[in-house]
Image (tube, helix red, strand yellow):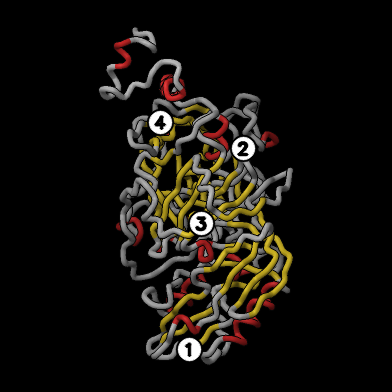
């Protein structure tokens, strides 16, 4: 055993790097050693954490067009490829399955390695009992010390997960020049019964809820003092992204405050203006920033104002309505199409921050021609800023200061880029789950109001005016599976 000021300890540092006693740098190094000795469990943690396989995420069209990453759970560690969802709270994986998505014999199972969690095979797995403060479904408990049940319903038709809550080690790593492994105990869902979209290739290996409720992993990591109460997600133009726990962004980022509902806070913000092409529209509505929804949903009158002004400035011929797709405004793309002729879009947030939309359209191909559509769906109750509007940004969900931050980036300029299996070329594309719920423990809890069947459509044909195209046949298949 060595005293922390001893010469033996100084030998762990490069020659000449140990700062003089009683200097600011000296006490900073001591604080760093304290964080290391205590397993990084101090509340004033400046560095960020990533999953054990790195911070990369990938948009995978064959798995519902959501962003996925690999997480490692338990001892020994078992890896799961989970969808990332800021619109819901609970992290769950398939476990002790009575009804789960198949892990073999399907198109997606041949392209990705999928796992099933077994609490009995992890030496660090712990039961979460009904007297735990995270057990919000105690009325369905058999007794005080029985396993806590959960049930979550999502907006996609008949899509849900149910099972019991468990606790186990989530394997993480620090994001700095000398990475350290971090093992954090988190509470998550042992998903025994899945239904709806979870059975036909949307998040077949689990969903990672990133919401503001106490049950979410960012909340748990913050309470344990492992990170600052903030995280960021980056959405690259090519579908490559990042996630970083504890990241509070940069001083030069734009910000807007969250509109907090005390009973169930979400990443809800206020939009005050929308510029469509050359037209500036004054608006006043709130919207949820939701990485678990592929496209953007707007309620009238905002939807009508945006779509009408887009149509008035579009140079190409409007196509007749097509019941197979959820988008109302679609146009024939001329052979000499120029992306600069398609009306641009920009949001002004509360506080004046400008949020330019990199690409408000999707491109679709028929057998003989190209079509582009305004990638905004008409909603009946809830405004949602979906993943397509977040492309090209690092989005910071700062729960400590209750602000949403954003900054333009290509996601490759950020530190510690790490590898993830690239997206395969799938022959058919399943529907996406429009993930999210209002209360993770309630059977009736669903994400509100998105135009009935269109509410769960998250079509995989988003493109940057060019390379990512697919046939109407696939869209027809999508629409009828919902």
470 or 122: nearer the viewer: 470
Residue visible at 40% across and 31% down in the picture: 182
Relative to residue 283, is residue 94 depicted above or below? Answer: above
* Category of crowding for the residue at label 3, using alpha-carbon neighbours closer than 10 angstroms: few (below 14), some (14–19), many (at least 20): some
Q: Which residue is mark 2?
A: 214
Name the N-terminal-most of marks 4 and 1. 4
Relative to residue 465, is residue 2 depicted above or below? Answer: above
Q: Which residue is mark 1?
A: 332
- How many angstroms separate mark 3 from mark 4 (CA)? 28 Å
Name the N-terminal-most of marks 3 and 4. 4
Where on the picture, by quarter, is residue 474? bottom left
Name the N-terminal-most of marks 2 and 3. 2
Mark 2: which secondary structure?
Answer: loop
Q: Which mark is residue 182?
A: 4
* Category of crowding for the residue at label 2, using alpha-carbon neighbours closer than 10 angstroms: few (below 14), some (14–19), many (at least 20): some
- How many angstroms separate mark 2 from mark 1 (CA)? 48 Å
* Category of crowding for the residue at label 4, using alpha-carbon neighbours closer than 10 angstroms: few (below 14), some (14–19), many (at least 20): some
Spot occupied by residue 12 in the image (x, y as percentages of width and height):
29, 20
Do the numbered discs 2 and 1 sit on residues whose CB atoms are within 8 Å? no
């Amino acid at each position: 055993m060595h005293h922390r000021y001893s010469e033996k300890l100084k030998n762990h540092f490069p020659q000449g790097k140990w700062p003089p006693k009683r200097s600011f740098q000296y006490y900073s190094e001591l604080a760093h050693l304290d964080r290391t000795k205590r397993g990084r469990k101090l509340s004033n943690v400046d560095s960020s954490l990533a999953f054990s396989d790195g911070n990369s995420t990938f948009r995978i069209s064959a798995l519902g067009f959501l962003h996925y990453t690999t997480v490692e759970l338990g001892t020994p560690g078992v890896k799961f490829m989970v969808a990332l969802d800021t619109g819901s709270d609970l992290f769950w994986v398939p476990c002790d399955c009575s009804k789960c998505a198949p892990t073999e014999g399907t198109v997606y199972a041949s392209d990705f390695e999928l796992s099933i969690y077994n609490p009995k095979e992890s030496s660090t797995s712990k039961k979460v009992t009904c007297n735990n403060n995270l057990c919000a479904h105690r009325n369905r408990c058999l007794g005080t010390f029985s396993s806590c049940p959960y049930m979550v319903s999502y907006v996609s038709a008949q899509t849900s997960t149910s099972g019991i809550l468990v606790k186990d080690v989530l394997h993480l790593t620090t994001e700095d020049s000398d990475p350290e492994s971090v093992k954090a105990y988190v509470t998550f869902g042992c998903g025994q019964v899945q239904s709806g979209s979870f059975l036909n290739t949307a998040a077949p290996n689990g969903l990672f809820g990133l919401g503001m409720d106490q049950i979410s992993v960012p909340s748990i990591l913050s309470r344990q003092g492992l990170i600052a109460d903030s995280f960021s997600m980056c959405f690259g133009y090519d579908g490559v992204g990042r996630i970083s726990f504890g990241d509070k962004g940069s001083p030069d980022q734009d910000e807007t405050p969250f509109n907090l509902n005390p009973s169930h806070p979400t990443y809800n913000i206020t939009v005050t203006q929308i510029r469509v092409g050359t037209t500036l529209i004054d608006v006043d509505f709130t919207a949820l920033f939701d990485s678990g929804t592929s496209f953007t949903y707007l309620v009238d009158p905002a939807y009508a104002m945006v779509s009408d002004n887009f149509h008035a400035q579009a140079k190409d011929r409007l196509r007749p309505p097509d019941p197979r797709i959820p988008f109302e405004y679609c146009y024939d793309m001329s052979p000499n199409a120029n992306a600069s002729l398609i009306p641009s879009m920009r949001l002004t947030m509360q506080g004046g921050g400008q949020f330019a939309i990199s690409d408000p359209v999707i491109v679709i191909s028929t057998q003989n021609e190209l079509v582009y559509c305004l990638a905004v769906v008409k909603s009946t109750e809830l405004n949602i800023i979906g993943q397509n509007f977040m492309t090209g940004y690092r989005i910071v969900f700062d729960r400590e200061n209750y602000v949403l931050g954003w900054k333009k980036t290509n996601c490759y300029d950020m530190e510690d880029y790490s590898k993830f299996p690239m997206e395969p070329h799938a022959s058919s594309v399943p529907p996406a789950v429009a993930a999210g719920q209002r209360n993770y423990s309630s059977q009736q809890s669903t994400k509100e109001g998105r135009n009935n069947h269109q509410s769960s459509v998250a079509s995989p044909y988003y493109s940057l005016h060019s390379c990512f195209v697919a046939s109407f046949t696939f869209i027809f298949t999508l629409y009828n599976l919902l």
